[in-house]
Amino acid sequence: MSTQASAVQTPTSFKPRIFSGIQPSGGLTLGNYLGALRRFVEKQDEGIETIYCLVDMHAITVWQDPARLRQQTREGAAAFLAAGIDPARSILFNQSQVSAHAELAWIFNCVARMGWMGRMTQFKDKAGKNSENVSLGLFAYPALMAADIMAYHATMVPVGEDQKQHLELTRDIAIKFNNDYKVDFFPVVEPLIEGAATRVMSLRDGTRKMSKSDPSDQSRINLTDDADAIAQKIRKAKTDPEPLPESIEGLRDRPEARNLVNIYAALAGHTVEQVVRDFAGAQFGTFKPALADLAVAKLSPITEEMNRLMADPGEIDRILADGSERADAIARPILEQVYDITGMIRSRRG
């Protein structure tokens, strides 16, 4: 190991810090709100530094219309803010404004192994039988995700079950970097998986995740939907002919029923068991209107605030720019230490 690398002061403990990001590659849904945004807001009150990011560089791993990407990035930021993210208490920015993400991703590309990337199930799902023709960025995407997290020495990441594998890869990259350079520099990040509806399912198929990429708009509730659209989608949500059971065990093998009960529980702040008790024996003709009223009450204020924010894109851009400056102030010193550790010669400017 070089003398320069040996002189680097590596931390023996890491400040608790949460990082998470959402792709601005389509309108955000009820699933994004219950599985991510609402939890992000709650974390602001726990005394832990919170950093939230619109990961626009991840979005372009598949082609994006430039004007639409800009619109969706602003819409994503508006959703964060409307859901309750306070840009004075949390850092909110878009990924491409902080170059440390791309710079650290290259170093992690050189740490990660091809075999690790090849085992990523999300790549296999997205590439399908066309893996030879997808972008290199889509294949290397988990290294950029690791850089997103490690650029801030984040110690915790709120993730859904579908992202656990990528987070495990982030841990592997951090461990390998530390071992390769004989330092204790990167924390081994921990996942935060909690809540009754961390994985909200499609309203048309209770075995599939609610997704903004689903071709059927009826499969999801968008955060931009008005009250009538929300109520109509819930009324038409797929169910089975049986009434709601008297115990949670009765939801087994009933994915659509379980999904709607999960959504109600998450929106109401109740346990699934409590919802089942309250509606035991009820037909969906009774349960769906109650769920629709609850969803409208919870989501309409968010939609209204998003519309207000989107009418002033300059204000959104100002918030993102301020957040990017604050994010860069954390990430840049960490990246400079990485360059020292890896043996890069860096001139000191200014």
Image (spheres, helix red, strand yellow):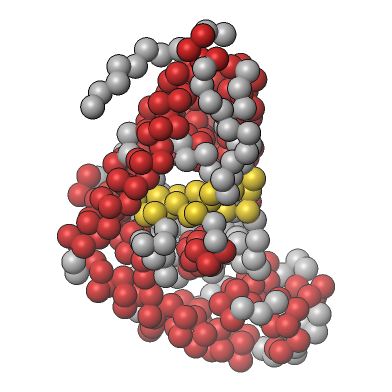
Q: Nearer the viewer, residue 324 or 258?
A: 324
Residue 293 location, x and y as percent? 49, 88
Q: Position of residue 348 (x, y in %)?
A: 30, 21
Indicate whether 38 appears above or below 77.
Answer: below
Q: Is residue 323 visible?
A: yes
Towards the viewer: 215 or 52: 52
Screen quadrant of the N terminus = top right
Q: Is residue 28 left or right of residue 240?
A: left
Q: Name the quadrant of the C terminus.
A: top left
Residue 15, percent from left and from top:
56, 45
Along the viewing direction, whichever of 310 and 260 lies nearer the viewer: 310
Tell me which corner region of the image, top left, top right, bottom left or bottom right, holds residue 195.
bottom right
Total residue callouts: 0
- Find the residue positioned furthest to the top: 2
Q: Could you tell me which residue is drawn at 56 percent across and 89 percent down?
A: 290
What residue sits 40% from the left and 26% below the top? 336
Q: Is residue 158 left or right of residue 305?
A: right
Q: Viewer-proximal residue, 4 or 274?
A: 4
Q: Residue at x 37, y 12 (%)?
A: 345
Lateral position of residue 109 relative to residue 181, left or right: left
Measuring 25% from the left and 23% from the top, which residue is drawn there?
Answer: 349
How far across and down, in percent of the image, does residue 275 sit? 69, 83
- Report if residue 240 is visible in the image: no
- Place residue 132 in its image quadrant: top left
Q: Using the image, determine if residue 89 lies above or below residue 340.
A: below
